[in-house]
Amino acid sequence: MANKKFWLGMLVIVLVFGMMVLGCGGGNRLQGTWVSSYGGVITFGSNTVTWDGDTGTYSTKGNDLTLTIEGVSITGTYSIDGDILIVSFMGETETFTRRR
């Protein structure tokens, strides 16, 4: 019986550790298509981005967002609140709404 409790305890520890490392399944919250207040469209794939027809790559670290489109990289910040994406680059802020 003690052996079963030990292995159950080990399983719980592994599951908790896995959730801490991998998260609870939220995935990449940026993925999807977003429409700006001016009508511009930005689509995030797993690591690709298309912004108003131009395609490139992106990476995130915390709330930092780096886009590389046509060989030009730009770094800014982003935040997501429900279906609202707020992106700031070089002092300019743009708000996007998730397209469903």
Image (cartoon, rainbow, N blue to C red):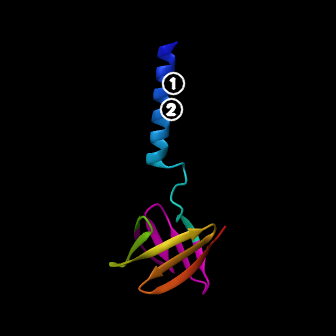
The residue segment tinted magenta is 34-58
The residue at the far left in this view is: 71
Query: On screen, 28 above or below 87?
Result: above
Circle 1 residue: 8
- Residue 41 on image: x %, y %: 56, 78
Dot 1: within a 10 Å radius of its alpha carbon, few (fewer than 14), some, or many (20 or more) residues? few
- Residue 37 on image: x %, y %: 62, 84
Which quarter of the image is occupied by the C terminus?
A: bottom right
Residue at image coords 45%, 75%:
77
Query: On screen, 7 above or below 29?
Result: above
Q: Kindly state the secondary structure of the residue where label 2 is placed.
A: helix
Mark 1 touches mark 2? (CB < 8 Å): yes
Q: Kindly state the secondary structure of the residue where label 1 is placed.
A: helix
Dot 2: within a 10 Å radius of its alpha carbon, few (fewer than 14), some, or many (20 or more) residues? few
Circle 2 residue: 12
Q: Examine the structure image and report whether residue 99 is included in the region drawn in magenta.
A: no
Q: Examine the structure image and report whether residue 54 is included in the region drawn in magenta.
A: yes
- Residue 94 on image: x %, y %: 54, 83
Relative horizontal placement of residue 11, taking residue 35 as reference (left or right): left
Name the residue type under label 1: Leu
